[in-house]
Image: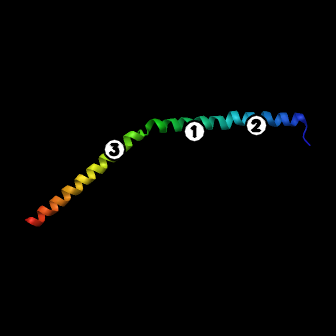
């Protein structure tokens, strides 16, 4: 069985590992996440663009149909 001193040494080593390995990695991950959040377009803007694209697609379809009709007429 381990002695109290052994447990204290294990705890000290775990703190060192957390400080030197895990904490820096978590900070890097958080920084990357923040960068992603800053560069993403807001949801409202995306929804706005989706509506515009949908409208433009419908106009393009209408114009294509009209052009096809005009080509048949000539």
Residue 44 screen position, x and y as percent: 39, 40
Residue 69 screen position, x and y as percent: 14, 63
Name the N-terminal-most of marks 1 and 2. 2
The answer to which image quadrant residue 41 occupies is top left
Question: Rounded to the nearest whole Å, what is the CA distance between mark 2 and mark 3?
Answer: 50 Å
Using residue 74 as the reference point, say whether residue 31 is left or right of it. right
Q: How is the image coloured?
A: rainbow
The local secondary structure at tag 1 comes to: helix
Using residue 55 as the reference point, say whether residue 65 is left or right of it. left
Q: Is residue 56 above or below residue 40?
A: below
* Residue in the picture at 51% in, 35% down: 34
Question: Rounded to the nearest whole Å, what is the CA distance between mark 1 and mark 2?
Answer: 21 Å
* Residue in the picture at 84% in, 33% down: 8
Question: Rounded to the nearest whole Å, what is the CA distance between mark 1 and mark 3?
Answer: 30 Å
The answer to which image quadrant residue 58 occupies is bottom left
> Disc 2 designates what residue?
14
| Numbered circle sitting on residue 29 | 1
| Numbered circle sitting on residue 49 | 3
* Residue in the picture at 46% in, 35% down: 38
């Amino acid at each position: 069985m381990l002695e109290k001193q052994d447990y204290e040494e294990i705890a000290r080593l775990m703190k060192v590992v957390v400080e030197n390995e895990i904490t820096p990695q978590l900070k890097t991950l958080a920084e990357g996440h923040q960068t992603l959040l800053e560069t993403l377009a807001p949801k409202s803007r995306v929804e706005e663009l989706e509506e515009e694209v949908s409208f433009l697609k419908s106009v393009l379809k209408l114009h294509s149909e009209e052009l096809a009709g005009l080509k048949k007429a000539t």
